[in-house]
Image (cartoon, rainbow, N blue to C red):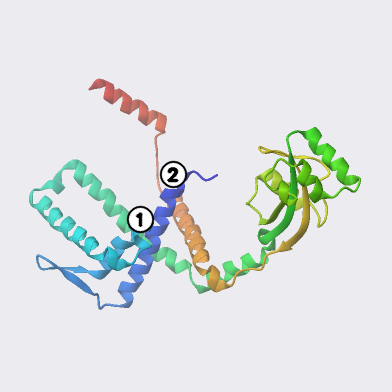
């Protein structure tokens, strides 16, 4: 399973890149920027406000912009006048502050450049090509309609299989033998696709033919299963319009990864291990 911390970091960078791609294209396409107001004679622009809005948590962005627009502008005004006061006090010349500002500036510049680079690759032709590949990959849309009988031991499962081979009804056996919640319904699990069941169960179910049941017990963390597949089918592919946002996101993630990998390959990067860094940090702490 993908590590949540690293997934969050990568998704955050993708989001930033996508934001700068869309906002940058909008700004170049339309020189008539919309003013929101002024702070000491300096204009605050709508596109700057919208950049900040896009960085808000989902719970804010899923509500109407009118609900938080004024507060967002107020926060930006407060940040600007406080930053001006900090510069007057030469706060920006402190080593730690200057270092943090450099990191923030690098991030903004990187996102802007990466946004334009990625946007250049994620065009209509790339989206159409990705969609055609998805449509051709019918295996990813394979579904099964199945039932199962869940029991506690392998011997119990073998006994169920023996009964089925003698011609006993699967649904009736499920009602009397299965310990799972689907037992009263004849063991029915409905229709599911790949990735929706634990791997051992999924592999066994998708390997069966229509109307057949597993000849050997299938073990998962829940117990021992006997699986019957009623029907296998290929789900119809969604339309291109329905998948466009997902395809753009996937292509953007792939393009971003490729661009960063190519950049890294050309750099002289030397990184110390976490263990070494921790050792130095602990030594520094003990010396104080």
Q: Which residue is mark 2?
A: 5
- Asked if residue 84 lies left or right of residue 254, the reply is left
The mark lying in front, picked from 2 and 1, is: 1
Where residue 184 sits in the image (x, y, percent)?
72, 48
Where residue 139 sits in the image (x, y, percent)?
69, 59
The total of numbered circles placed on residues is 2
Q: Residue 77 falls in which quadrant of the image?
A: bottom left
Q: Is residue 198 above or below residue 277?
A: below
Q: Which residue is mark 1?
A: 57
Quarter of the image with the C terminus is top left
Which residue is drawn at the image coordinates 10% and 53% (left, top)? 85
Which residue is drawn at the image coordinates 46% and 50% (left, top)? 265
C-beta proximity under 8 Å, tags 2 and 1: no
Q: Residue 22 falls in which quadrant of the image?
A: bottom left
Where residue 130 sits in the image (x, y, percent)?
57, 66
Which residue is drawn at the image coordinates 52% and 69% (left, top)? 244
Q: In the displayed image of the protein, which residue is found farthest to the right?
A: 166
Q: CA distance from mark 2 to mark 1?
A: 17 Å
Quarter of the image with the N terminus is top right
Between 271 and 252, which is closer to the camera in this rendering? 252
């Amino acid at each position: 399973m993908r590590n949540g911390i690293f997934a969050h970091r990568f998704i955050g960078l993708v989001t930033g890149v996508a934001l700068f791609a869309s906002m940058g294209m909008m700004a170049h396409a339309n020189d008539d920027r919309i003013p929101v107001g002024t702070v000491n004679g300096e204009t605050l622009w709508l596109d700057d406000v919208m950049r900040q809005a896009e960085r808000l948590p989902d719970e804010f962005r899923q509500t109407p912009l009118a609900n938080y627009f004024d507060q967002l502008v107020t926060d930006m005004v407060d940040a600007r006048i406080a930053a001006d006061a900090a510069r007057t006090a030469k706060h920006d010349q402190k080593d730690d502050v200057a270092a943090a500002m450099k990191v923030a500036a690098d991030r903004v510049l990187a996102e802007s450049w990466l946004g334009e680079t990625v946007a250049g690759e994620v065009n209509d032709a790339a989206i159409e090509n990705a969609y055609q590949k998805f449509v051709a990959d019918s295996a990813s849309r394979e579904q099964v309609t199945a039932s199962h009988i869940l029991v506690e031991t392998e011997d119990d499962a073998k006994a169920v299989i023996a009964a089925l081979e003698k011609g006993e009804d699967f649904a009736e056996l499920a009602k009397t033998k299965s310990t799972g919640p689907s037992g009263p319904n004849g063991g029915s699990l409905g229709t599911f696709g790949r990735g929706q069941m634990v791997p051992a169960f999924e592999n066994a179910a998708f390997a069966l033919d229509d109307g057949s049941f597993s000849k050997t017990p299938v073990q998962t963390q829940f117990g021992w299963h006997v699986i019957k597949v009623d029907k296998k089918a290929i789900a119809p592919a969604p339309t291109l319009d329905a998948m466009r946002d997902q395809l753009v996101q996937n292509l953007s993630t792939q393009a971003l990864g490729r661009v960063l990998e190519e950049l890294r390959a050309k750099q002289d990067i030397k990184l110390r291990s976490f263990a070494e860094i921790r050792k130095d940090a602990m030594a520094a702490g003990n010396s104080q």
